[in-house]
Amino acid sequence: MADLFMDAPDVSGDDYCVFGLATCFLKEEGELQSVEIIEPIPSAAIEAIVKGIPTSYRLACAKSLGQLFIDGVPTIPAEFPPHSQFCDSFDERAIAATRTYKTHPDAQEFIPLGTSREDVNYSTDRKRVLNSVHIVGNDDNVKQHSHTHKVL
Protein backbone atom coordinates (compact mmCIF):
# COMPACT_ATOMS: atom_id res chain seq x y z
CA MET A 1 0.00 0.00 0.00
CA ALA A 2 2.87 2.36 0.75
CA ASP A 3 4.23 2.04 -2.80
CA LEU A 4 0.82 2.89 -4.25
CA PHE A 5 0.62 6.20 -2.44
CA MET A 6 4.31 7.14 -2.59
CA ASP A 7 3.56 10.04 -4.93
CA ALA A 8 0.48 11.00 -2.90
CA PRO A 9 1.59 11.38 0.73
CA ASP A 10 -1.65 13.22 1.53
CA VAL A 11 -3.70 10.08 0.80
CA SER A 12 -3.88 6.90 2.89
CA GLY A 13 -5.72 3.59 2.87
CA ASP A 14 -8.19 4.93 5.46
CA ASP A 15 -9.41 7.75 3.19
CA TYR A 16 -12.97 7.83 1.86
CA CYS A 17 -13.91 7.55 -1.82
CA VAL A 18 -17.00 6.60 -3.84
CA PHE A 19 -16.70 4.02 -6.59
CA GLY A 20 -19.34 3.62 -9.24
CA LEU A 21 -20.39 0.86 -11.59
CA ALA A 22 -20.93 2.54 -14.96
CA THR A 23 -22.39 1.08 -18.11
CA CYS A 24 -20.13 2.16 -20.96
CA PHE A 25 -19.84 1.06 -24.55
CA LEU A 26 -17.13 -0.06 -26.95
CA LYS A 27 -17.60 0.44 -30.66
CA GLU A 28 -16.53 -2.64 -32.60
CA GLU A 29 -17.21 -2.97 -36.32
CA GLY A 30 -19.95 -0.36 -36.13
CA GLU A 31 -21.75 -2.13 -33.28
CA LEU A 32 -21.88 -0.95 -29.67
CA GLN A 33 -21.01 -3.51 -27.00
CA SER A 34 -21.79 -2.68 -23.38
CA VAL A 35 -19.15 -3.08 -20.65
CA GLU A 36 -19.41 -2.60 -16.90
CA ILE A 37 -16.68 -0.27 -15.61
CA ILE A 38 -15.68 0.43 -12.01
CA GLU A 39 -14.46 3.99 -11.62
CA PRO A 40 -13.95 6.52 -8.83
CA ILE A 41 -16.62 9.22 -8.61
CA PRO A 42 -15.37 12.67 -7.48
CA SER A 43 -17.35 14.66 -4.92
CA ALA A 44 -18.65 17.15 -7.50
CA ALA A 45 -20.32 14.36 -9.46
CA ILE A 46 -21.78 12.45 -6.51
CA GLU A 47 -23.99 15.35 -5.47
CA ALA A 48 -25.52 15.56 -8.95
CA ILE A 49 -26.03 11.80 -9.03
CA VAL A 50 -27.89 11.63 -5.71
CA LYS A 51 -30.07 14.61 -6.74
CA GLY A 52 -31.47 12.57 -9.63
CA ILE A 53 -29.47 13.75 -12.64
CA PRO A 54 -29.45 10.93 -15.25
CA THR A 55 -26.24 8.93 -14.99
CA SER A 56 -24.57 5.91 -16.53
CA TYR A 57 -23.87 4.63 -12.99
CA ARG A 58 -26.04 1.77 -11.75
CA LEU A 59 -24.42 1.66 -8.34
CA ALA A 60 -22.34 3.95 -6.16
CA CYS A 61 -20.43 2.45 -3.24
CA ALA A 62 -18.46 4.29 -0.53
CA LYS A 63 -15.27 2.54 0.54
CA SER A 64 -11.91 3.38 2.01
CA LEU A 65 -9.01 3.10 -0.39
CA GLY A 66 -7.60 0.27 1.70
CA GLN A 67 -10.77 -1.76 1.10
CA LEU A 68 -10.30 -1.53 -2.66
CA PHE A 69 -6.52 -1.79 -2.90
CA ILE A 70 -5.50 -5.12 -1.37
CA ASP A 71 -1.68 -5.24 -1.14
CA GLY A 72 -1.58 -2.25 -3.50
CA VAL A 73 -3.62 -3.98 -6.21
CA PRO A 74 -7.20 -2.92 -7.04
CA THR A 75 -9.61 -5.72 -6.15
CA ILE A 76 -13.24 -5.91 -7.27
CA PRO A 77 -15.45 -5.46 -4.19
CA ALA A 78 -18.27 -7.92 -3.46
CA GLU A 79 -20.91 -5.27 -4.36
CA PHE A 80 -19.76 -5.25 -7.98
CA PRO A 81 -20.28 -8.03 -10.54
CA PRO A 82 -17.19 -10.20 -11.07
CA HIS A 83 -17.18 -9.48 -14.83
CA SER A 84 -16.80 -5.72 -14.29
CA GLN A 85 -13.51 -4.02 -15.20
CA PHE A 86 -11.53 -1.17 -13.72
CA CYS A 87 -11.34 2.05 -15.72
CA ASP A 88 -8.12 3.24 -17.35
CA SER A 89 -5.71 4.95 -14.92
CA PHE A 90 -7.78 3.64 -12.02
CA ASP A 91 -5.05 4.20 -9.39
CA GLU A 92 -4.46 7.83 -10.34
CA ARG A 93 -8.16 8.57 -10.68
CA ALA A 94 -8.89 6.99 -7.27
CA ILE A 95 -6.28 9.20 -5.63
CA ALA A 96 -7.63 12.30 -7.40
CA ALA A 97 -11.24 11.50 -6.44
CA THR A 98 -10.21 10.82 -2.85
CA ARG A 99 -8.65 14.27 -2.66
CA THR A 100 -11.99 15.83 -3.69
CA TYR A 101 -13.67 14.23 -0.66
CA LYS A 102 -10.87 15.51 1.59
CA THR A 103 -11.50 19.00 0.24
CA HIS A 104 -15.31 18.65 0.51
CA PRO A 105 -15.91 16.30 3.47
CA ASP A 106 -19.61 17.21 3.54
CA ALA A 107 -20.04 15.18 0.31
CA GLN A 108 -19.37 12.04 2.38
CA GLU A 109 -22.85 12.42 3.88
CA PHE A 110 -24.54 11.42 0.60
CA ILE A 111 -23.24 7.85 0.83
CA PRO A 112 -21.84 6.92 4.25
CA LEU A 113 -18.68 4.80 4.37
CA GLY A 114 -19.44 1.12 3.88
CA THR A 115 -22.82 1.69 2.22
CA SER A 116 -23.97 1.81 -1.38
CA ARG A 117 -26.80 3.36 -3.37
CA GLU A 118 -28.67 1.85 -6.25
CA ASP A 119 -31.52 4.38 -6.21
CA VAL A 120 -29.88 6.55 -8.87
CA ASN A 121 -31.45 7.82 -12.11
CA TYR A 122 -29.72 5.21 -14.26
CA SER A 123 -29.89 5.92 -17.98
CA THR A 124 -27.90 4.98 -21.05
CA ASP A 125 -29.68 7.43 -23.36
CA ARG A 126 -26.40 9.35 -23.68
CA LYS A 127 -24.00 6.51 -24.34
CA ARG A 128 -20.46 6.73 -22.99
CA VAL A 129 -18.37 5.28 -25.82
CA LEU A 130 -14.88 4.53 -24.48
CA ASN A 131 -13.01 3.98 -27.72
CA SER A 132 -14.53 6.70 -29.88
CA VAL A 133 -12.13 8.90 -31.82
CA HIS A 134 -13.00 12.49 -32.64
CA ILE A 135 -11.01 13.91 -35.52
CA VAL A 136 -10.82 17.67 -35.25
CA GLY A 137 -11.51 19.50 -38.48
CA ASN A 138 -12.13 23.03 -39.72
CA ASP A 139 -15.81 22.73 -38.86
CA ASP A 140 -14.83 22.55 -35.17
CA ASN A 141 -13.22 25.99 -35.22
CA VAL A 142 -15.00 28.76 -33.40
CA LYS A 143 -16.32 31.32 -35.85
CA GLN A 144 -15.31 34.86 -34.97
CA HIS A 145 -16.81 38.08 -36.11
CA SER A 146 -15.00 39.57 -39.10
CA HIS A 147 -14.03 42.68 -37.08
CA THR A 148 -12.49 40.75 -34.16
CA HIS A 149 -8.85 41.24 -35.19
CA LYS A 150 -9.20 44.55 -37.03
CA VAL A 151 -7.96 47.78 -35.59
CA LEU A 152 -10.72 50.34 -36.04
Image (cartoon, rainbow, N blue to C red):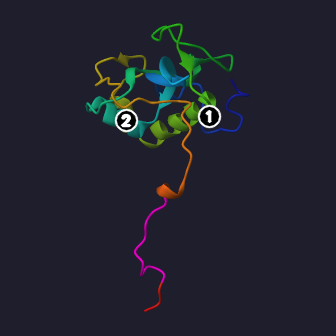
Left or right position of 12 against 22: right
Depth check: give the residue in front, 146 or 82: 146
Look at the image and tell me in which quarter the N terminus lies: top right
User: Measured along the vertical axis of the image, is residue 118 above or below residue 55?
Assistant: above
Q: Position of residue 38 (x, y in %)?
A: 51, 21
Inter-mark Cα distance, 1 to 2:
20 Å
* Circle number at residue 92: 1
Q: State yes or no: residue 50 in magenta.
A: no
Q: The magenta stretch spans which residues?
A: 141-149
Residue at disc 2, secondary structure: helix
Q: Earlier along the polypeptide chain: callout 1 or callout 2?
A: 1
Residue at label 2? 107
Residue drawn at 52 percent across, 39 percent down = 99
Considering the whole magenta stretch, tell me its main secondary structure: loop
- Element carrying mark 1: helix
Percent x, y of residue 65: 56, 24
For the residue pair 31 and 84, the one nearer the viewer reads as 31
For the C terminus, the quadrant is bottom left
* Residue depth check, mark 1 versus mark 2: number of the one nearer the observer: 1
